[in-house]
Image (cartoon, rainbow, N blue to C red):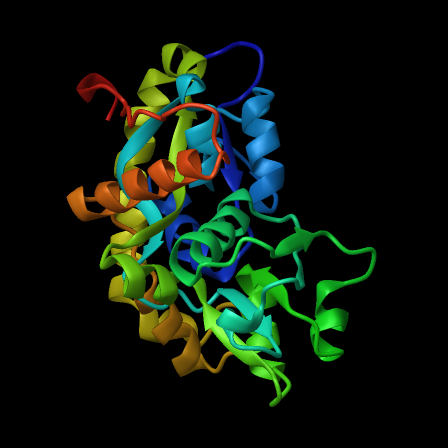
Amino acid sequence: MSDNRPFTVGHIPYLNCVPFFHYLSKYGFSGKLISGVPSALNRMLQQAELDVSPSSSFEYARNWRNYLLLPGHSISSAGPVESVLLFSPLPLSDLAGETIAITGDSATSINLLRILLREFVGLDQVVDEVPDQPVEALIEKGKPALLIGDRALQMACNRPHSMHRFDLGQLWYQYTGLPFVFALWMARRDSVKTYGEELSALCGQLDQSRSRFLAEVDSLAEILCPESCLTDQGKAAYWRTIDYGLDEKHLAGLELFFDLCLKYQLLDEPAQLEFLPPGEN
């Protein structure tokens, strides 16, 4: 244990992360949680303000030498993910020359959108940018835009009838037949030296918290996250939709995503998938 600060873990305050965190303290977790959107946690992990975090898979790819992956855990989908959504007044094939508004909340989803449009739809002339007004306002005006997390869920509840809604997890699975891994649990390599015992414990705590949550998901949906636009049944269904595992198929999907990022010069070099050694998990 470090004398300087407590073991510090990133926390994404999205509905899809609740299964990891709801019961975490019940299984012995006593570290410090710091909340932020994925892009903010990426920066904090880079700057050693966090020891471990569920962070963008693209962040792992571009800085993989700094991290080790916690085995068995991700935020993925093998089909619809329901909370990474492109809203558009046009079909995908008609988006050439359009500008897509993005929030900048996630590095992975933005680059997944770029790859889907270039590799599978065949569009090279699509621009994405962070606008100077809320993305939701642009969607209401009929402009194409990408939303993630709870903001995507909220817009899906309120979506204008004239807009198409494209689920990026579903599109990836449709084109590749592989799961898409949006986020990975990753630890800083230097934190592994300092917090090896805490990281080993966290792997088990995440397993236990996630398993208990999903076993009780229907009853928990009735009491948790009342601010969500989803019904209790909708929340339970959403939590069941997310794939929280990380097996060989997930890794194959990750490697394909990384290869396509290289192809389209979104990454400078190949990324290697490296995990916590057996003694630390």
Nearer to the camera, 248 or 75:
248
Judge whether 65 appears above or below 166 on screen.
above
Residue 86 drawn above or below residue 31: below
In the image, 162: left or right of 261? Answer: right
For the N terminus, give its image quadrant.
Answer: top left
- Does residue 75 appear to the left or right of 130 in the view shown? left
Kindly identify the residue that appears in the image at 51 percent across and 58 percent down. 123
Q: Residue 56: x percent and y percent?
A: 47, 41
Q: Which quarter of the picture shows residue 221?
A: bottom left
Residue lying at the far bottom in this picture: please name it. Answer: 161
Which residue is rendered at x = 39% and y = 70% of the image?
A: 238
Q: Is residue 235 visible?
A: yes
Expressed as whole percent of the image width and height from the top left, the position of residue 17 reads 44, 53
| Residue at figure coordinates x 55%, y 50% from the top left | 110
In which quadrant of the rendered image does the C terminus lie?
top left
Task: Name, please, the residue furthest toward the right.
Answer: 132
Q: Nearer the viewer, residue 91 or 82?
A: 91
The residue lying at 27 percent from left, 46 percent from top is 253
- Count of numbered labels shown in the rendering: 0
Q: Position of residue 5 (x, y in %)?
A: 57, 17
Kindly tell me whether residue 246 is visible in this rendering.
Answer: no
Q: Position of residue 33 (x, y in %)?
A: 54, 37
